[in-house]
Image: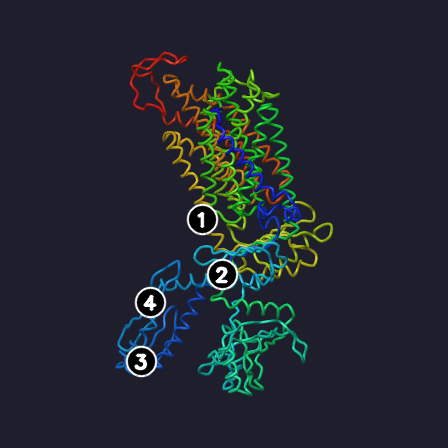
Amino acid sequence: MLHFSRWKTTLIWLTVLAGVIFALPNFLTQSMRDDLPSWMPDRPMTLGLDLQGGSYILLEVDRQSLIDERVQTLEDEVRQTLRTARVGYAGLNASGQTVTLRLRDPAQAEAARTALQPIVAPVSGNLLTGGAITELQLDEPETGVFTLGLTDQGITNRLSNAVAQSIEVVRRRVDELGTTEPIIQRQGADRIMVQVPGLQDPQRLKQLLNQTAKLSFHLVDQTGSPADVARGGRPPAGAQLLYTNDATPQPVLIQRQVMVSGANLTDAQAGFDGQTNEAVVNIRFDSQGAQRFGSVTQQNVGRPFAIVLDDKVLSAPVIRQPILGGQAQISGSFTVQTANDLAVLLRAGALPATLDVIEERTVGPGLGADSIAAGEMAGIVGAIFVVTFMVLAYGFLGVLANVAMFINVLLLVAILSLLGATLTLPGIAGMVLTMGMAVDSNVLIYERMLEERRNGRSVIQSIDAGFSKALGTIMDANVTTLIAAAVLFYLGSGPVRGFAVTLALGIVTTVFTALTLTRWLVAFWVKRRRPKEVPTGWINFIPHNTKIGFMKVRNWAFSITGALSIASVVGFALFGVNQGIDFTGGTVIELRAKGNTADIQKIRQDVSMLVDGDLQVQEFGSARDVLVRFGVQQGEGETPQATVDAVRGALTADYDFQRVEIVGPTVSGELAWAAVLGVCGALFGIALYVWFRFEWQFALGAIIATAHDVLMMLGFLVLTRLEFNLSSIAAILTIVGYSLNDTVVVFDRIRENLRKFKKKPLEQIIDESLNDTLSRTILTAVTTVLALCALFAFGGEVIRNFVAPMLIGVLVGVYSSIYIAAPVLIHFKLRPETVALPGESEAAGDPPAPRRTSTAGGV
């Protein structure tokens, strides 16, 4: 495996060169990137909101408002159709998803059916549904009575269309803010995700996205008394009661008929009234709108004309003279800011349905800068730890491993840049963890080299065997972690997905650098130097040829493990974990005092008057930083914006809002289910892979060991009361992959020894296999723990809840690989006590035993 043809060498270094070129923009300033040649890539990785600040909002189309509006439109359409067809009706009303019609004369049933047929005709579907859609169902429950009901297929189609239209409207509105590189994407059937990096005023964004912005012009109804209708009276036929948008809303009776629609607008600009100098919005209609607006104002001089936005009357001026130029003015006690915002809304167009904010995450630019600094420090310290350790443990081979590790990181950064991926704080954690796990493959190779040399092979044979015999183990170990990363990406969201992408790509680059680049470096060194011995390090951390009898204490280990597992389950049942808002719903606000210290007592007092239920106010990192947490407020449901706005108003004078996260109950329930499915899916996928690669006993051992690790981590979270959120799930799944990585290495050596020693008792084979891989197990754990310790110490307060379970998980994973996974093979009788079958040669070191036929056969 040490021979490389010229084309392979060229391909390897071209890959490295491409990695350097694509990663380079991430290490240059903007001015330096501007000076790069045109053929070189100049775009670095996009920083996530947690690193550069900004707002993340998840919007959901209000399904019920969409249905109500469609039913109301259908009622008007049926009324107009019957009048045109001269079909008389005694009753026409809408209820739920149905419009019911009763004819005056049942003899006109056929004429009514014919007139209504075009309304219920199938419509063309959208790109998602395709084909013809039966949106309405026409039924005749009795003679002279018709019902027109919305079908589920029709509602789904209309909902899909509404989401598609809303995305375009939202994009136009966000673009009006002048922000750079906003991300607006569809999520699921009825949701829209909006990310706006660097936005300094997230409150304004919410206000722009929360409004439907349906503008319409109606004549004011002067036949009834608005005050009487407001007190419970019945409005005149064809009229409805609305209220003004003033501080003290006043009732206004308007005619239902829309005289001019906002759909006819072509432009809207904020300005000032020439006489009063008040802020106004100047609007311009298209030719059809101008003609209709001129006709209405010409025919109704002297009558009030109401301007209605989202069922609120902005103003109702009296028409003094016909307005024939296609231009008009909207006034209504505007400030400069509100006039600008209304102009933005009108230019972007109306949303086809109401959008509810069901999740919100806002990070201030100051916190983003702190996160970048913390991530850089964690990466530098982690790299120093790992580099130093590898050099001390393996000498010159450790130097080669460190070179490969740095190129590994460069390739990872290059791929993320090329894919246009977004780097988040958990993504940085994934990169630091990749550094710690990247040397795992080199440790496997180097330990195998040293072992082969101790067994009497030549230097060249030992080096070659180190790579060839470690190949299968490295692939098995990394595939299990890749499965966990895939499940994380599929079921995760936001930062969790960023971590999964970084982890998965890190695995790919690690396999390349370990099995190709490191091998080339070693082969080049061997060819040039002709070494007389395999290099070793300055410190032998783990003695070779250990003879520890691990299986002698397996029953004690099982007893201790069983007791701790039961304690974890009981603790979880009695006390549960400290669930974050990802699973419970609610609001988390991170504050930073504008002065030297934060007054936690006063914050608790001020906020307690604004929120109901449990309120947590605690110091967060430094004396200036405070974390405020409260649950979903009763009566606000999916849109807890009012409470957050009230808290912002009460504290904004003395505190900067570093981070705001709002999760509605619907989203939190979905995230909880996704978390459960994620853990179960990862376990199932890994079990299938281990079963396919080994035997069913190995798969059961892997699953039992992994379940043990998950239970131990849950017990740790119950005991420490650390917040349990989506990042905790990411940590658990990462440890699942890491633990299986270690377990598979042990299983691989057990399988090798089973083939080598066909008569030796299984207990003895397992002990030998564990001792053979002990140095690799410990050294890999040390490198990973060093990287995690750097993250824990320097990664910042937010990342610590993510790293702490992983630190415990690494240690528990080492324990379970030795004392859980391996002994399970004995319990499930992977190999009964047998001797060689007829014709088998006795391997050296096998003790004599009575001969009998085996039905299990081993591996």
Read off the residue under disc 4: 122
Give the SS element for disc 2: helix
Q: Nearer the viewer, residue 798 or 52?
A: 52
Read off the residue under disc 3: 103
Q: Amino acid at mark 3?
A: Leu
Read off the residue under disc 2: 167
Return the disc, 2 or 3, that comes first in the chain's sequence.
3
Give the SS element for disc 3: strand
Q: Amino acid at mark 1?
A: Trp
Q: Residues within 10 Å of mark 4 (few under 14, many from 20)?
A: some
Pinpoint residue 391: horizontal percent, then vertical percent.
Answer: 61, 26
Return the disc, 3 or 1, that comes first in the chain's sequence.
3
Q: CA distance from mark 4 to mark 3?
A: 24 Å
Read off the residue under disc 1: 673
Image: 817 above or below 329: above
Pinpoint residue 746: horizontal percent, then vertical percent.
Answer: 46, 26
Q: CA distance from mark 4 to mark 1?
A: 37 Å
Q: CA distance from mark 2 to mark 1?
A: 27 Å
Return the disc, 4 or 3, that comes first in the chain's sequence.
3
Q: CA distance from mark 2 to mark 4?
A: 25 Å
